């Protein structure tokens, strides 16, 4: 028997139909801002740009770069068993990452806008046999249309951020109605599991954070060698995945470090690479020479700020800098992923806002692999301490690396939880083969 929609969900459905005629205007605006690809704009209307592969199909959706990165090991496992996989995401950067990282044969499409007609068109073409939504990108029409077709729906690496929890608690019946349509919710942490349960999800397993099982980000050997040659013996620090408002503090900390560490070079990778020019302008306004990696430039001896405004090259920065400041933590964003630099042996510095990875930052802080700062002055102080004491820094980095490595295992637990559904796909595939 179909679940009755709440009044709020019925209103959402009506409004999403009503605004459909204006969707082209929204897409055109996003295209002008560089947030869409012209040649793939039709995908946002549910129109495919690829054929559906033959056989059972797993559909995996992640909102952006972080979610897509986290499920790469899962996708590799599926692909290694000759299972067809469709991956969707909602950002240009995540599409580029998918092209770089996905196994051969995996199809990527942009997620359609959450308009019933677009979603139905998408599902009519792709006809997934299993749908996996990653972390917390929950669109009502996608959930409802998927559920109406009887396709098993599973939340993977489920996360409920502080802000999402506060928002969803205001609409408990509606979010509960949506979560009840999931066959299974796999939560990152016990806290996420508790929140999902409070919100109405009936079937929950705590599997851990798959991001702990993701290999360290790769680096192009030739590019790494070129950067090392250009940098030479200069002291190097990095600020990774920074957000607006943080680069000012990073640049100020750099200025404080110059007197004690002559020639210090700061690498800044903005969370959104298109902000590279704005970051360089902040450095220039402070009297510092900045160059942009997107312009194929290497740092020369006069360069003080090197802006890594390219996609998929954080692995380069983490291999070059022994101390890394994690962005999104001095502003109220919740902190970016500290696992990758910790795996590559960097000592970490972060601000107070780390709710996105609260448990991991707490574990790193406890063993000394990371230290919390509050402003430019404390940022400079912590970095100076580690630059001046390589032995202490090495101990901190090793403690952080061991900590994240010992917390792995979520990938296998996730695969175990998914096994009954994967078995059904295999049986379906055999039935098609013998038909």
Image (cartoon, rainbow, N blue to C red):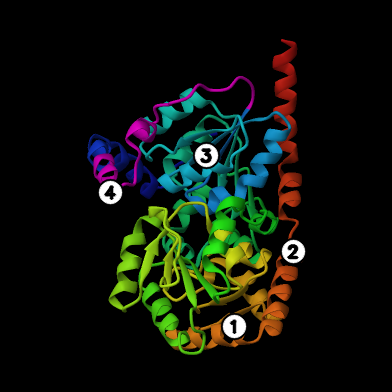
Q: Which sits in the foreground, 173 or 343?
A: 343
Answer whether labels 2 and 4 touch (C-beta < 8 Å). no
In this view, the residue in front, 139 or 393, is 393
Q: Is residue 425 above or below residue 142?
A: above
In the rendered structure, are the residues bearing label 1 and label 3 in contact, judged by CB atoms less than 8 Å apart? no
Residue 337 rendering spot, x and y as whole percentages: 56, 63
Q: Which span of residues is magenta-colored? A: 27-56
Q: Residue furthest top?
A: 435
Q: Nearer the viewer, mark 1 or mark 3?
A: 1
- The local secondary structure at tag 1 comes to helix
Picture coordinates of residue 355, whole percent (x, y) = 53, 70
Residue under pointer 1: 387
Q: CA distance from mark 1 to mark 4?
A: 40 Å
Query: Which of pointers 2 and 3 indicates the residue nearer the eye?
Result: 3
Which residue was labeled with disc 3? Answer: 99
Regarding mark 2 in the picture, which secondary structure is present there?
helix
């Amino acid at each position: 028997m179909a679940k009755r929609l709440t009044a709020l969900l019925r209103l959402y459905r009506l409004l999403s139909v009503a605004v459909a005629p204006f969707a082209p205007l929204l897409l055109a605006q996003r295209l002008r801002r560089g947030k869409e690809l012209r040649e793939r704009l039709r995908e946002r209307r549910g129109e495919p740009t690829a054929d559906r592969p033959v056989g059972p199909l797993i559909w995996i959706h992640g909102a952006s770069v972080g979610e897509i990165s986290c499920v790469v090991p899962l996708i590799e496992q599926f692909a290694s068993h000759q299972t067809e996989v469709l991956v969707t995401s909602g950002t240009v950067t995540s599409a580029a990452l998918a092209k770089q990282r996905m196994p051969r044969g995996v199809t990527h499409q942009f997620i359609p806008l959450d308009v019933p007609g677009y979603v139905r068109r998408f599902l009519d073409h792709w006809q997934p046999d299993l749908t996996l939504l990653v972390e917390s990108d929950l669109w009502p029409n996608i959930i409802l249309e998927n559920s109406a077709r009887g396709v098993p729906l599973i939340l993977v690496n489920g996360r409920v951020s502080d802000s999402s929890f506060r928002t969803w608690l205001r609409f408990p019946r509606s979010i509960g109605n949506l979560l009840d349509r999931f066959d299974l919710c796999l939560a990152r942490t016990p806290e996420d599991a508790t929140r999902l349960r409070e919100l109405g999800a009936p079937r929950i397993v705590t599997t851990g954070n798959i991001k702990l099982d993701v290999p360290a980000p790769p680096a192009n050997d030739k590019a790494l060698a070129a950067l090392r040659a250009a940098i030479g013996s200069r002291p190097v620090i990095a600020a990774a995945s920074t957000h607006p408002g943080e680069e000012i503090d990073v640049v100020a900390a750099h200025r404080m470090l110059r007197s004690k560490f002559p020639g210090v070079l700061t690498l800044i990778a903005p969370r959104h690479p298109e902000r590279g020019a704005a970051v360089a302008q902040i450095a220039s306004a402070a009297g510092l020479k900045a160059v942009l990696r997107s312009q194929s430039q290497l740092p020369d001896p006069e360069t003080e700020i090197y802006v890594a405004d390219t996609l998929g090259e954080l692995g380069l920065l983490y291999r070059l800098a022994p101390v890394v400041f994690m962005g999104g933590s001095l502003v109220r964003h919740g902190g970016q992923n500290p696992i990758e630099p910790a795996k590559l042996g960097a000592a970490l510095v972060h601000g107070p806002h780390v709710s996105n990875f609260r448990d991991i930052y707490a574990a790193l802080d406890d063993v000394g692999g990371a230290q919390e700062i509050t402003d430019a002055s404390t940022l400079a102080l912590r970095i100076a301490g580690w630059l001046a004491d390589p032995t202490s820094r090495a101990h901190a980095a090793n403690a952080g690396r061991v900590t994240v490595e010992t917390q792995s295992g979520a990938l296998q637990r996730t695969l175990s939880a998914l096994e009954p559904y994967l078995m059904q796909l295999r049986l379906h595939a055999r039935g098609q083969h013998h038909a």
